[in-house]
Amino acid sequence: MKDEILKGNKTVLSKAITLVESEKKEHREEANKLMLSLLPHTGKSLRVGISGTPGVGKSTFIESLGMNLIDLGHKVAVLAIDPSSQKSGGSILGDKTRMTRLSAEEKSFIRPTPSRGDLGGVALSTHESILLCEAAGFDIVLIETVGVGQSEVEVNELCDQFVLLLGPGGGDELQGIKRGILEFVDFIVVNKADGALEKKAQVAAHEYKSALEILRSDLKASDRVFLCSALENKGLDKFWQALEQVSAKTNKNLKRAGQLQYWYTKGLEACFKDYILSQGLDKSKDVLKKLEEGKSTPLSLAKESFKSLLG
Amino acid sequence: MKDEILKGNKTVLSKAITLVESEKKEHREEANKLMLSLLPHTGKSLRVGISGTPGVGKSTFIESLGMNLIDLGHKVAVLAIDPSSQKSGGSILGDKTRMTRLSAEEKSFIRPTPSRGDLGGVALSTHESILLCEAAGFDIVLIETVGVGQSEVEVNELCDQFVLLLGPGGGDELQGIKRGILEFVDFIVVNKADGALEKKAQVAAHEYKSALEILRSDLKASDRVFLCSALENKGLDKFWQALEQVSAKTNKNLKRAGQLQYWYTKGLEACFKDYILSQGLDKSKDVLKKLEEGKSTPLSLAKESFKSLLG
């Protein structure tokens, strides 16, 4: 697989992502070997997270942006986190049909990635999927997520720059967005600044700037909020230039170091969950008996069990 | 503390909940002892989860319902899960002012409970808080959650009966609700069936019945959907009678056994997270060095570390 990926073979890239997503033990070992052999060829892309509520025009935005970037000579990978499915299978077609123009491009690669667990995090493998795209020569990786649930917090642990896409709704819309996002967002783009909504979008952008000014003393709000019309491909160029400038001034490795530790920790937690399942601790009859007899609360018994687990 | 709680002393009950919520080691040990001594006096309440989107009138509903139940001779505890705060401190006042009539009652106890972690689950201690309320003689425990994020999935792991409170919005509103909820909901109550909205609420209730009929062959939809006006205290009595009937026919212990195992497993996972932090694994320089040198991906290294952790 390695050589084909390095040549940019998209079919093999796709298979490799399926491999790292697999939870089967033998697949995991194969995935490890592949990742180790490819690691020297990774890390060179600009990783951009893009989050926005449903209906804000995310697909149109990413398609327009992607087309522009390809025109500029880039190779663009899009990883779309799908919070509705825990397996990636069902939504591939959905994503291809969402971005028909972009997906037809030789220099694009679009792939949905599953979400994790019942609390809606990002699949642990997504970090490795990004690395695989980089090894295949994609120098821009867009990681898309719906701004619902908590996946955007974890997307920020995957990207160099985090972009929040908003509609022209202004203050009302901002209310629906978790405060937490504004604490780490790098750019806000107000989409749909076209036709009858243009004025409204301008007002909204102004409101977002004010909000950012209050919440973020670490950046200049006026350099971080942009208006665009993805439909008419207006304003995307300016936004991207600004993003590239900020990115050039930022030490990527600093944020990425924290991210490596974040995913390492998540990896450890996942190993422990697997361990619980493999040992049948979640369905142990002995444990249930003790709990039902009222000899302990679940939390206290968990403490005891854990102590004896780690000797 | 034990004796005072068994006497129904609400001040001490409140302190005991703060104790089980504490993450300090010495508090945890004290909490364990207290819980063990109280376990024989727990389990006798009817635990009802109530979820609904913001604006649906949850506070008014719970207040009216609570007042009715007190009139019937019950003692009613309300645990309100607050997804916006990770600590309970700030919102106590908020909850008391939300339900002024109910909180003034001798036979009521209202308490906010914090949410857990960045993915928005329910605090592990909430299960123990319920037990404490039971030991203090509350025979009905209402667990309130906002139907946003994933806390309702976990509230279902705390209650005997799960109630979804909806507005008169009908199909549109149903779209905004995660499909998953309908898979485990026991009752749907359409609130605001009063004044100008009464007709709309009737139509909505009809739609919800149809949805439930399609999705849930395990229950009779027409017995599970109710109209009410919390504001005018209409329809709450019928709903509660139905809930009591269903509850009487249900073997509580079956669901509760699964819940004990659920919280035991969550407890084990929490122990492991604590372990990671206490050992500084999330910030280990050795780990970061290996990762930055490209000798391993976070996931692979986590696997290796985990193996050596568990010998």
Image (cartoon, coloured by chain):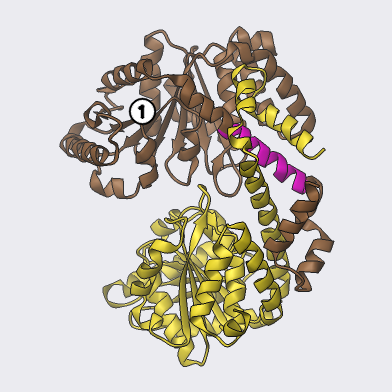
Chain colours: A yellow, B brown
Q: Which residue occupies the foreground of this view, A254 or B112?
A: A254
Q: Which residue occupies the foreground of this view, A246 or B93?
A: A246
Q: Name the quadrant containing residue B288.
A: bottom right
The magenta stretch is B262-277
Q: Is residue A99 above or below residue B302?
A: below
Residue ID for mark 1: B61
Compared across the picture, whether B11 is left or right of B142 comes to right
**Quadrant position of the N terminus of chain A in the picture:** bottom right
Give the residue drawn at x 20%, y 41%. Answer: B207
Residue B263 covered by magenta stretch? yes
Q: Residues within 10 Å of mark 1 (few under 14, many from 20)?
A: many
Spot occupied by residue B38 in the image (x, y as percentages of width and height): 65, 14
Spot occupied by residue A275 in the image (x, y as percentages of width and height): 66, 45
Inspect the image, locate mark 1, and give the three-letter code of the amino acid beneath it: Phe
Spot occupied by residue A244 in the image (x, y as percentages of width and height): 58, 83
Q: Is residue A228 above or below residue B266?
A: below
Spot occupied by residue B237 in the image (x, y as percentages of width and height): 29, 18
Q: Name the quadrant containing residue A93.
A: bottom left
